Amino acid sequence: MLKYTRGAVGHCRPCFRGESGGCGLKVVLQRVSKASVAIGGDIVGSIGVGFCLLVGFTSTDTEAQVDWMADKVAGLRLFSDAQGKMNLTLGEVGGSFLVVSQFTLYADVIKGRRPSFIDAARPETAIPLYERFLAALRALGFEVASGRFGADMLVEIHNEGPVTLILERMA
């Protein structure tokens, strides 16, 4: 029988199990044929074939976790080869990234009807990590479009497949 503790719903496996270690960096990756993000009706970032990444941070996330995640998503083989197998990386298909900050990945809905976001990093912590993540992807040679941290954004995602992964990196 599972024991539900604070943070059980919407959190990582260690939190769900009541283990130490807490939640870490979260990314929801969607393989897309195209994606864009608009703020106030103006498109501020768009890509064709690639990955749309919804990224959330906690106050305990580190630069090492961010660098690891950038390397991980850049190397995932999620595009079809000539035999129709998911065997090609983003770089091999000439794809790009659209990265959108998403603090709501840390919603805690175990109690009540209104989510708590207490585990999401405050802007003074999350913004430098978000900027480092963008820079790490660019340093790997990718075109990277992004939303604007903290803005009210309209994200249009054309999920291809559909292919959606949830990635976590603990400290």
Image (tube, rainbow, N blue to C red):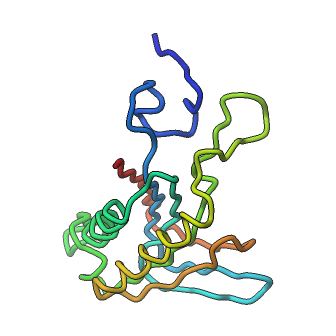
Residue pictured at 59% horizontal, 52% vertical: 120
Foreground residue among 147 and 51: 147
Residue pictured at 80% horizontal, 83% vertical: 40
Q: Is 57 displayed left or right of 133 in the figure?
A: right
Q: Is 72 displayed left or right of 25 in the figure?
A: left
Q: Position of residue 103 (x, y in %)?
A: 61, 57
Q: Position of residue 78 (x, y in %)?
A: 31, 66
Q: Residue reaching furthest front?
A: 124
* Number of disc labels: 0
Q: Is residue 143 above or below residue 155?
A: below
Foreground residue among 75 and 124: 124
Q: Position of residue 139 (x, y in %)?
A: 31, 85
Give the quadrant of the N terminus: top left
Q: Residue reaching furthest top?
A: 1
Q: Position of residue 10 (x, y in %)?
A: 56, 39
Q: Is residue 137 above or below residue 94?
A: above
Foreground residue among 170 and 145: 170
When asked about the image quadrant of residue 158, the answer is: bottom right
Residue pictured at 57% horizontal, 56% vertical: 121
When asked about the image quadrant of residue 72, the answer is: bottom left
